[in-house]
Each structure stands twice: as structure tokens, then as C-alpha cells.
Amino acid sequence: MTETGIGTGASSAAVVRAADAMLRAFGGTEVGLIFPLASLPNDPSAQLGLADPGVEEVILSPVVVRALLTPMRGPRRRLEFLLSATSVAAQLISRNVASAKDLFDGALGLRYENEVFHIENVMIEHFGGTAYLYRVLGVE
């Protein structure tokens, strides 16, 4: 298995393709993963913390979004985002991140329908040693 969590065998690729097809068939949409920008302008106000470094948004697709029950006290909305392992693995490579946990830990949140959700929990679904689906719990 590679560092991205996706196995390299023929059956591993088939499991990942089947999960991607399922996400697209169930109305796969897209979400934005929001990251802080790493570089600050070379300006004294930025060095003092007076300038906002900004954010970068990375689009992940296909994604299926499920509404979850919300307790009487707590967040207004709880959504479960089912993310494609293929799109997460592509971001691991492009952002040079060692694991999906590190990728989601470094994110400020998820953007869905112009609202930002805090990432509360990430679960990785495996089959035969292959990560094929990421379940991300987002709260508003």
C-alpha cells in the first residue's frame, strides 16, 4: 500500500473506481477544502500580524453530502461528507502531505453551499487494505 492509503493491486483500483462511480451516481457534488496560505507578504504589517495572509480553497469531487440529526444543544447543522479517495489522494500528492489525517488537520474547514463547516471528525473506510472512501463530519 502507498502512503496515500490507496493500494496498488488490480482489486484495489477496482474498489476505488467503484466507490467513485457510486459517489457520482448518488448525485456527486463538490466541496472546497480551505487552507491558510503559507506565505506572508514581505511587509512590516504582515510580520506584526496586522495583515491577513488569506486562504486557499481546494475543490474535491465527487462528494455526497448527508444531513445528520442535530442534538437540541450543539451545532446548528451537522453534515457528513463522503469524499472520494481518488480526489483526496491527488491532494496528498499535490500538497506534499504524508497522510489524509495531516491533510484534514491542516484545513481550516470545508465550504459547501457557500457556508463553512468545521471538520469535527474524519473516518477512513477500508476494503482489503485499501482506503476507498473518507467520511468527514462537518458542523456549522
Image: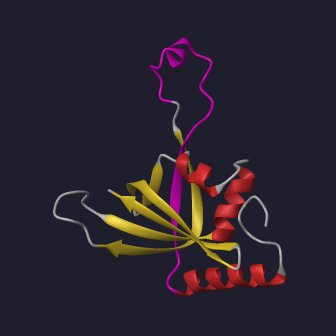
- Quadrant housing the N terminus: bottom right
In the rendered image, the vertical position of residue 90 relative to residue 83, given as above or below: above
> Which picture quadrant has residue 4?
bottom right
**Pick the front one: 25 or 17:** 17
Was residue 117 drawn as part of the magenta stretch in this picture? no
| Percent x, y of residue 51 | 48, 23
Q: Nearer the viewer, residue 28 or 83?
A: 83
Residue in front for this viewpoint, 32 or 76: 76
Marker count (numbered):
0
Rendered position, 24 above or below 4: below
129 with respect to 108 (left or right): right
Q: Which residue is drawn at 64% across and 62% down?
A: 88
Residue 76 rendering spot, x and y as whole percentages: 24, 60
Residue 18 coordinates in the image, percent (x, y):
66, 86
Residue at left offset 56%, top offset 81%: 23
Q: Residue lying furthest top in this view?
A: 44
- Please name the residue shown 61% across and 34% down the image: 38
Q: Magenta stretch: residue 27 in it? A: yes
Residues shaded magenta: 26-52
Q: In which quarter of the image is residue 75?
A: bottom left
In the visual, does 17 lie left or right of 140?
right
Furthest toward the right, the residue is 9
The residue drawn where x is 58% and y is 16% is 43
